[in-house]
Amino acid sequence: MSHPHTYDKLDLLQQAMMGDERMRKAELLDELRAEIGVVADRLEEDLWELYRFVIRTLYEKITVYQYVGIYLCKEAQFENLYHEGFSSLPPVVRFGEGFLSLAAARGGMVREQIGSRTEVYVPFYRGHHLIGQLVVISDPYDGIDEEDIALFCELASLFESKIEERSS
């Protein structure tokens, strides 16, 4: 028979460890924000390099991200511009199909849990015109939380501002 105080101490220790993990993740996401911001300033108008840097950095630094990619709108479809990792998403998705189209129709982020993974689609625009979407897939399903979502939305805003600068 275990002592009730032992269980309480173990429970407190587990809670503290989870708090430490969340703190480390928050610090890592803040470091990524800073690193991406510096590179974005240096790249000025080179969107391709910015997309590539963001995708590679997210994929390499956050181990639960199984896939990170950018799809751009071209004619009547979404085309994968660049990605890291593995996904069952095809390189070309016609408008009206899949979660890319759902996010476009909603005009905002879509987060879906599919089996053991979470898929997040974050559109970015120039004015009211959809330019593309940041796609992140994690496995396990709980690998993406609200802090991750906030980062993805900030990155979409960064892409929008860089697109606007380039167009001016």
Image: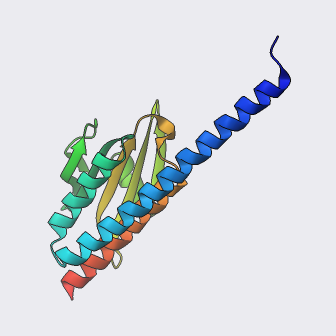
Residue 45 shown left or right of residue 123 in the figure:
left
Q: Nearer the viewer, residue 128 or 156?
A: 156
Position of the C terminus by quadrant: bottom left
Residue 91 shown left or right of residue 20 in the figure:
left
Residue 151 percent location from the top left of the image: 43, 61
Residue 101 percent location from the top left of the image: 36, 54
Q: Is residue 116 above or below residue 42?
A: above
Q: Nearer the viewer, residue 142 or 79?
A: 142
The residue that appears at 21% across and 66% down in the rendered structure is 50
- Outermost residue, bottom side: 168
- Residue 103 shows in the view: yes
Residue 39 percent location from the top left of the image: 24, 70
The residue that appears at 36% across and 41% down in the rendered structure is 63
- Residue 96 shows in the view: no
The residue that appears at 17% across and 78% down in the rendered structure is 45
The residue that appears at 84% across and 23% down in the rendered structure is 4
Residue 79 shown left or right of residue 34 in the figure:
left
Position of the N terminus by quadrant: top right
Residue 51 percent location from the top left of the image: 22, 62
